[in-house]
Amino acid sequence: MGLVTCDVTVSVDGFVAGPDQTLEQPLARGGETLHRWQFEQSDVNASELAGILDAGAYIMGRNMFGPVRGGWPEDRRGWWGPNPPYHAPVFVLTHHARGPVEMDGGTTFSFIEAGIGEALARARSAAGARNVAVAGGASTINQYLAAGLIDELRLHIAPVLLGSGERLFGDVEPPLWLMPIAARATDSSHTLPTG
Amino acid sequence: MGLVTCDVTVSVDGFVAGPDQTLEQPLARGGETLHRWQFEQSDVNASELAGILDAGAYIMGRNMFGPVRGGWPEDRRGWWGPNPPYHAPVFVLTHHARGPVEMDGGTTFSFIEAGIGEALARARSAAGARNVAVAGGASTINQYLAAGLIDELRLHIAPVLLGSGERLFGDVEPPLWLMPIAARATDSSHTLPTG
């Protein structure tokens, strides 16, 4: 059985996304600066990206799939276009039933109403011997952290101050056991103001 | 003229100290686990410690010097015993006048009522060509960050979850320019639960 992993990029002040998420700005105000490292070419960045997309199945919250509330509009198929980067089963936590949505390239979105435990069981089953990745957003990651269900948390700390937004570790209370595995720095020296 | 540096150890959820500071627990509940790395022998840790104590003058808030409120009791001489580790002038921000306190080993505590700008001017003058270090706590560091007065912020991120306490970057609003200089990991693999 694989590990349950979680790659998450946080601002230096601990936010996974900025405030005021909209359809046009899924990472909210300033949030896209968090992920700029993914578009900068370096060996470390390429290796980190490969690690993020190496899982056999993914879990995400409904807010990561789409910010709509209530029932699902049939045309809501995520943020990623017709061929999402997952190429694997993706389990979306929701309170609203919806049948699976098959995308190009092997990504299938399945909608789970029975909570984080059921989503993890389904993802483990789909992943087989490979890892299951908790993809986000903050609320979903925090629920899995609080439940002690994440084996390997990979924090990508961006040199960006957001000031407000969705906080990683929000509502996660001690004790939480953490053991350092490894740390490394990108060779990026880019900087931009935020806000 | 030297740099204005700030070494600060934060929990993985962004706290500089835990909740409920007391005279017996100056770093508050769980806070001492943050600083365990300083007592673990490794080349990286030794080098980091040397960097922290390399300044020509230091600035700290009154809460770091002592949690007392109101006027100063004459016997309040910091947390560090008769020979503090600074061996240099230390400027303590306060609203209550007090004459300088000379300690063994070259540390002198001077009490500054005129705010962070005056404290920095005094520290720069005392440090000459050497660096000035903003030693803490969170409120003092946050004031200097918000004012854009810190040249080099050295974040030491500990694998500890505190859940609450004194937050680094609290009240610091974007935009804040940050440029990565370097990052490295200790070889520590110790872990302890907190809370």
Image (spheres, coloured by chain):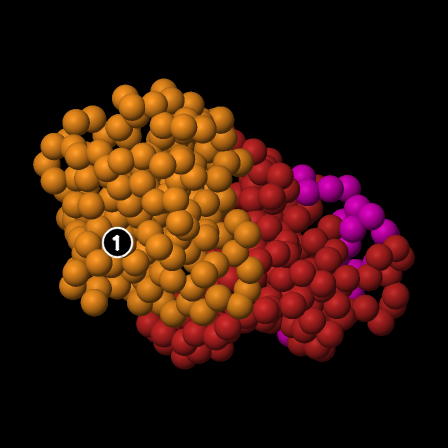
Chain colours: A orange, B red
Q: Is A100 drawn above or below residue B52 in the view shown?
A: above
At 46% from the left and 33% from the top, the residue drawn is A18
Q: Is residue A44 visible?
A: no
Residue A190 sits above or below residue B181 on the image: above
A111 or B112, which lies in front? A111
| Image coords of residue B138 (percent x, y) | 62, 52
Given the image, on which type of amino acid does mark 1 rest? Answer: Ala
Screen quadrant of the C terminus of chain B = bottom right
Quarter of the image for residue A188 reads top left
Give yes or no for residue B64 being in the magenta stretch: no
Q: Which residue is mark 1?
A: A123
- Asked where in the image residue B24 lies, by quadrant, the reply is bottom right
State the residue in front, A34 or A27. A27
Tell me the magenta residue range. B94-117
Q: How many marks?
A: 1
Counting from the top left corner in percent of width and height, residue B40 is at 44, 78
Q: Report whether B98 appears left or right of B46.
A: right
Residue nearest the observer in this picture, B99 or A43 = A43
User: Chain under label 1?
Assistant: A
In the rendered image, residue A78, in percent from the top left (x then y), is placed at 28, 30
Q: Is residue A61 left or right of residue B145?
A: left
Q: Residue at x 73, y 50 (%)?
A: B93
Q: Which residue is depicted at the point 50% across and 36% down? A: A165
**Within 10 Å of the Cα at label 1, are there few (<14), some (14-19), or many (20+) other Cα atoms?**
many
Foreground residue among A56 and A169: A56
- Residue drawn at (87%, 68%) of the image: B74
* x and y percentages locating residue A17 in the rendered image: 43, 36
